[in-house]
Amino acid sequence: MSLPDGPADHRRHHHRHRKEDKEDEVRRMLQTPHPSVPADLCDRAAAHGARLLRRRRALRRTGWLLLTAAALCLTVWASATQPWDPPPADRTPPLIGW
Amino acid sequence: MTGPHTLALYEDVSDRQTATRRRRAREFEAFVAGAAPRLLHAATLLTAEPPTANPHAQRLLTAALARTYAEWDRLRGEDPYDRTRQELAARFARAARRHSRPRGGLLDRLTSQERLILVLRLYEGVAEEQTAALVGLPEERVRAICARAVAAMRDTAVRETAARVMTVQNATVQDAAARDAAGTAADARGARTP
C-alpha cells in the first residue's frame, strides 16, 4: 500500500511535468508559419506517380509474359523428349536360355 | 467473338480505366490541397532549410506524394496522410547523409536523426513506439534521442535569448554611459560657468 501523495510521487509528477513543459516549449518553437506550397507540386507528384504506376504495370506484364513463355517452352520440350520414359539400356541384357 | 463486340468490350474497359484515373486524380488533388502545407513544413524542418528556400524539402515531398498516388487504389482504408508521412520519413532516413550539411533552417544544430525523431514525435505527434518502428530503433533510444534534441533546442533558444538580452543590455549600458558622460560634461560646464 502506498500513499498517493508521497514525496517520491511528488517528485515523479514534478519530473513528468518538467519534461512535458520542455517538450511543449520546443513544440511551440516548431510552430512557425508554414512555407508556401508551389502551385505545381500536386501536378508534378501526380505525373511522377502515374509514371511509377505505368512502370510497375509494365514490369508486372513482362514478368507474366516471361513466366508464360517459360511454361510453354517446358511443355513443348517435355512432350518432345518425354523425360519420364526410362532411358534406353546401354548394355545388352545377358543371354539366358539360349 | 466478333469484331464489333470485341471493340465494344475494349471501349468499355478503356472508359472504366479513364473514369478510375479521373476519380483518382480528383481525390488525390483534394488530399494534397489539404495535407501539403503541413507536410511541406515537416519536410522543411527535416531538411533544415529556411521556409523561403526549400528545394530539397519540395523534392522530398513530391517523391513521397508520387508514391502515395501510385498506391492510391490499394490503400484500402489506410490514411493517405499517414502513408505519405511514413514514406517521407523513410526517404529522409535513406538520404540522411545528404541532409547533414547545415542549411540555415530552424533545426540546423541537430543531426539528421535527431531532426527526424523530433519532427515525428513533437511536430507530427507520432507515438513513441510507432516512431521507433519508423526509424528502426528501440523505444529507449528514441526517447533518449528525443530528450537530447529537446535539450539542444532549448539550449540554443536560451543562448539566443541571452544574446539578444546582452545586446539590449549593452545598448542600454552604452546609452547610460553616453548620458552619464554628457551629464558629467554638462555638470562640469555648469561648475565652470558661474
Image (tube, rainbow, N blue to C red):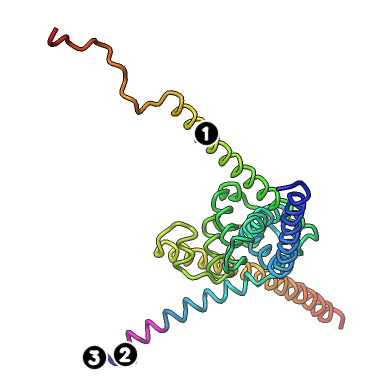
Dot 3 surroundings within 10 Å: few (below 14), some, or many (20 or more)? few
Q: Which mark is residue A6?
A: 2
Task: Give the quadrant of residue A16.
Answer: bottom left
Q: Which residues are magenta?
A: A5-13
Q: Kindly state the secondary structure of the residue where label 1 is placed.
A: helix
Task: Specify whether B192 is left or right of B167.
Answer: right
Task: Give the quadrant of residue B69.
Answer: bottom right
Q: x, y (%) of residue B150? A: 52, 67
Q: Nearer the viewer, residue B58 or A42?
A: A42
Asked if the magenta segment contains residue A10, the reply would be yes
Q: x, y (%) of residue B33? A: 74, 67
Q: Nearer the viewer, residue B180 or B62?
A: B62
Q: Are marks 3 and 1 in contact (CB under 8 Å)?
A: no
Q: Which mark is residue A72?
A: 1
Q: Which is nearer the N-term, disc 1 or disc 2?
A: 2
From the image, tell me which residue sits under label 3. Answer: A1
Distance in Å between CA atoms under marks 1 and 2: 79 Å
Nearer the observer: mark 1 or 2; the answer is 1
Dot 1 surroundings within 10 Å: few (below 14), some, or many (20 or more)? few
Q: Are marks 3 and 2 in contact (CB under 8 Å)?
A: no
Disc 1 residue type?
Leu
Task: Specify whether A6 is left or right of B32.
Answer: left
Q: Kindly state the secondary structure of the residue where label 2 is placed.
A: loop
Distance in Å between CA atoms under marks 3 and 2: 12 Å
Task: Specify whether A60 is left or right of B56.
Answer: left
Of all chains, the one bearing label 3 is A
Of all chains, the one bearing label 2 is A
Q: x, y (%) of residue B4? A: 78, 50
Q: Residue at x 49, y 29 (%)?
A: A76
Q: x, y (%) of residue B116? A: 55, 60
